[in-house]
């Protein structure tokens, strides 16, 4: 049994971890432990110091040492004496804000709970268990259920929260975080993933300061600027040793992660919907379901933690036909043509691609409405016959006859003012009455909280998918959102629009992915602006970044790999000089980097030399040969590109028999030794033959001494080594 309860102590065990909490004598749910297994009740670590200006609950009478402000709490509330960041904050019908949650009851069930209207990690009944602990406000009828989904094999615990208003008057939820975790001891560092358009998920690891540090988004998307994932590492934690805790929020809208180091050096981590763009009006009898956080920890470093997240996301978050299957190698025309294409051009790209072994032609932005630049046409999802005279039918027919699949781009959530849709339904674009809306990339945002809008989008997109042989959809979203307002909601509910937008989006994606299980959906938001576990529930891959420069990509993909499996990372070879940075790298380097993902091309094949085309054909072949290893093998980060002159990674098969080592050496230097890298995750007792030099190494030598890379000449030169156990 993964979940047991003994003398009021809740033990949640997985194969290698233990989570403990207990309802104490006052009914306060106290957090005891999350970490390696201890075979012990960890409540001996609770301390009850008499700290100045720490208040005491009334029932504690004159015990100055019992304080909510110093105890590690399982779900911290606002307004009753804990002055650290709360997990939840409400306003009651009488305008007061105290919430004093005490233990009421618990339930244990087989299987994993689901969350109405929201994506959630899923499992068969025998694969997971659910613990629900119900807390109730001492003085009102507000109830809060804490839900824990327990995945034994995977060493993962999910958390979610339900708030119920069992009283007679409305309650306003001002904040409801999905995760709250107090950690009283240790020297912790905070790892978060910041960035910008074309440079997402850059890794920053910093010691905690006293006070609150935060990563968040108020953009209506999980954002390029911060990712809804976080790591807390003990100071000595490395890729292969030391303790760390990771959390990933399964949500695609605004989020907030706060880490507070309090006056005693204790750490609190909270994660949930961003309260700056959220509050919820909970009428009497209503419930609110918060999205889910995926949680894991490891005593063996960040590499193992990443494997746990890769595993659970690939197997229990992603869905559909392509979740575990090989994906088609694609060519996308965006960077090849931008808006300037016609049928002939697309057919030519497809023709050349098919000769090189590429499986699918993806027609990007510009095929619809009056869309000759980004100033018009969004919303008009009917073919642009000025560009595609024969319509989609003729184009797709030609592509299919080459033996290629066909995929297409949509940006359903957006509208151009210069479009038929906007002229017919200006009220469908979000704007605050009496104010001009903000434009971004010249476009406005459709009100996804309006069921009429969502229904229109469903009808339009599904008709196209029904009418044509489309086997892939790129679902784009190209701006941040403000001017939150829905004509469908009363004034007291306008603060709900950002969350209702996401609910509307998820509902639409659920309908479409359910109706078209054969179609591969790829998420996108100007590249990786909505790269999160929520979107991965609907789209098993996401275009990782509009930054396609191979050098910069090694950093982007390094950061992305901490939580997200390689199969989810859309990655393409593009033209040089690179359109974002002007840097030129070889076709080989670009190919090596793009192979650490769901692979494709995004350039005009016409402009390649014969040798480059040969290289492309070789890359496609090699990718197909190793795709299973790349997707299902364990992914190891072998260097830190921020600290070293290279980015190196490896894929090791489950039975440790095949190893693909790849990477890029950044800067050449004269009169230096060859670069050495040490491998991880091999079988120590085995011997491996390296394909490239035919030499036989022991697993121990490869992991302790490492291998010397071939002599490198020039900057940003990639390498690929393949080893097989003999
Ligand atoms: C976004 C995407 C690109 C491309 C363009 C089209 O920026 O990330 O890949 O589809 O939109 O407008």
Image (tube, rainbow, N blue to C red):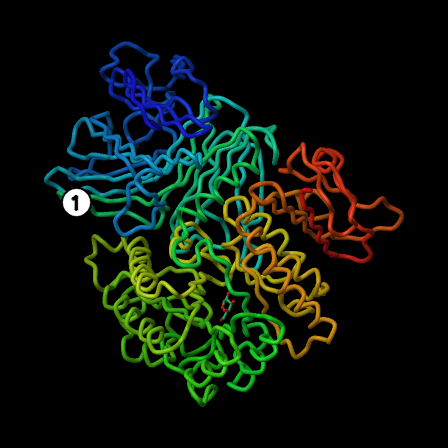
What residue is disc 1 on? 286
Residue 233 appears left or right of 690: left
The single residue placed furthest to the front in the displayed view is 726
Q: Nearer the viewer, residue 490 or 245?
A: 245
Residue 202 appears left or right of 266: right
> Considering only vertical position in the picture, is 653 above or below 406?
above
Q: Nearer the viewer, residue 719 or 227?
A: 719
Instruction: Residue at 73%, 36% (x, y): give it.
Output: 698
Instruction: Residue at 61%, 62% (x, y): give it.
Output: 548
- The image quadrant where one finds the N terminus is top left
Taking the image as drawn, is residue 484 in sight? no
Q: How many marks?
A: 1
Residue 723: x %, y % from top left: 69, 47
Q: Is mark 1 within 8 Å of ligand 1?
A: no
Q: The residue tagged with tag 1: helix, strand or loop?
A: loop
Q: Nearer the viewer, residue 387 or 94?
A: 387
The single residue placed furthest to the top in the displayed view is 62
**For residue 601, what is the image quadrant?**
bottom right
The single residue placed furthest to the right in the displayed view is 671
Residue 517: x %, y % from top left: 36, 63
Q: Nearer the viewer, residue 471 or 371?
A: 471
> Considering only vertical position in the picture, is 53 above or below 430?
above
């Amino acid at each position: 049994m993964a979940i047991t309860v003994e003398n009021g102590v809740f033990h949640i065990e997985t194969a290698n971890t233990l989570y403990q909490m207990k309802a104490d004598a006052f009914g306060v749910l106290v957090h005891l432990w999350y970490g390696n297994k201890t075979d012990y009740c960890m409540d001996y670590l609770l301390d009850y110091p008499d700290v100045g200006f720490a208040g005491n609950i009334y029932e504690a009478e004159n015990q100055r040492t019992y304080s909510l402000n110093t105890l590690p709490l399982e779900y911290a509330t606002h307004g009753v004496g804990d002055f650290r960041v709360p997990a939840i904050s409400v306003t009651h019908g009488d305008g007061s804000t105290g919430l004093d949650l005490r233990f009421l009851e618990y339930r244990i069930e087989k299987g994993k709970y689901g969350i109405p209207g929201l994506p959630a990690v899923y499992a068969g009944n025998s694969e997971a268990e659910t613990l629900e602990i119900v807390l109730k406000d001492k003085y009102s009828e507000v109830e809060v259920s804490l839900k824990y989904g327990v995945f034994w094999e995977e060493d993962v615990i999910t958390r979610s929260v339900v708030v119920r208003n069992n009283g007679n008057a409305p309650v306003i939820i001002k904040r409801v975080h999905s995760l709250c975790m107090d950690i009283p001891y240790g020297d912790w560092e905070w790892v978060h993933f910041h960035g910008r358009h074309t440079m997402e998920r850059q890794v920053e690891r910093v010691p905690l300061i006293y006070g609150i540090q935060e990563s968040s988004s108020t953009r209506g998307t999980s954002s390029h600027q911060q990712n809804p994932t976080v790591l807390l590492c003990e100071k000595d934690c490395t890729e292969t040793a030391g303790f760390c805790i990771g959390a990933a929020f399964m949500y695609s809208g605004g989020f907030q992660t706060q880490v507070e180091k309090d006056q005693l050096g204790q750490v609190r981590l909270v994660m949930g919907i961003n309260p700056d763009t959220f509050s919820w009006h909970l009428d009497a009898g209503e419930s609110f379901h918060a999205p889910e956080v995926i949680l894991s920890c490891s005593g063996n470093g960040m590499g193992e933690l990443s494997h746990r997240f890769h595993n659970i996301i690939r197997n229990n978050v992603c869905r559909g036909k392509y979740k575990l299957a090989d994906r088609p190698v694609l060519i996308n025309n965006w960077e090849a043509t931008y808006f300037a294409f016609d049928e002939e051009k697309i057919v030519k790209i497809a023709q050349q691609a098919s000769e090189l072994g590429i499986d699918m032609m993806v027609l990007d932005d510009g095929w619809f409405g009056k869309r000759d630049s980004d100033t018009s046409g969004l919303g008009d999802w009917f073919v642009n016959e000025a560009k595609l005279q024969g319509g989609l039918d003729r184009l797709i027919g030609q592509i299919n006859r080459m033996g290629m699949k066909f995929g297409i781009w949509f940006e359903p959530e957006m509208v151009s003012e210069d479009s038929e849709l906007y002229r017919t339904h200006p009220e469908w674009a979000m704007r605050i009455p009496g104010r001009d809306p903000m434009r971004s990339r010249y476009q406005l945002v459709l009100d996804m909280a309006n069921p009429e809008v969502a229904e229109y989008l469903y009808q339009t997109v599904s008709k196209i998918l029904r009418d044509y042989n489309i086997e892939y959809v790129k679902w784009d979203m190209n701006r941040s959102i403000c001017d939150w307002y829905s004509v469908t909601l009363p004034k007291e509910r306008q603060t709900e629009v950002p969350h209702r937008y996401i609910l509307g989006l998820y509902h639409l994606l659920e309908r479409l992915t359910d109706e078209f299980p054969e179609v591969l959906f790829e998420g996108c938001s100007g590249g990786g602006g909505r790269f999160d576990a929520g979107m991965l529930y609907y789209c098993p891959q996401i275009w990782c970044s509009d930054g396609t420069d191979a050098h910069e990509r090694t950093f982007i993909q390094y950061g992305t790999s901490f939580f997200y499996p390689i199969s989810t990372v859309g990655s393409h070879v593009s033209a040089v000089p690179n359109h974002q940075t002007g840097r030129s790298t070889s076709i080989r380097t670009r190919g090596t980097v793009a192979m650490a993902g769901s692979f494709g091309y995004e350039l005009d094949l016409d402009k390649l030399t014969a040798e480059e085309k040969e290289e492309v054909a070789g890359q496609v072949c090699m990718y197909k040969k190793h795709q299973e290893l790349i997707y299902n093998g364990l992914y190891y980060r072998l260097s830190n590109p921020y600290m070293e002159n290279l980015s190196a990674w490896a894929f090791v098969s489950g039975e440790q028999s095949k190893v693909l080592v790849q990477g890029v050496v950044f800067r050449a230097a004269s009169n230096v030794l060859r670069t050495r890298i040490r491998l991880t995750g091999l079988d120590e007792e085995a011997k491996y033959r390296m394909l490239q030099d035919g030499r036989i190494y022991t697993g121990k030598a490869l992991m302790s001494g490492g291998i010397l890379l071939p002599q490198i000449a020039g900057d940003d030169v990639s390498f690929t080594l393949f080893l097989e156990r003999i």
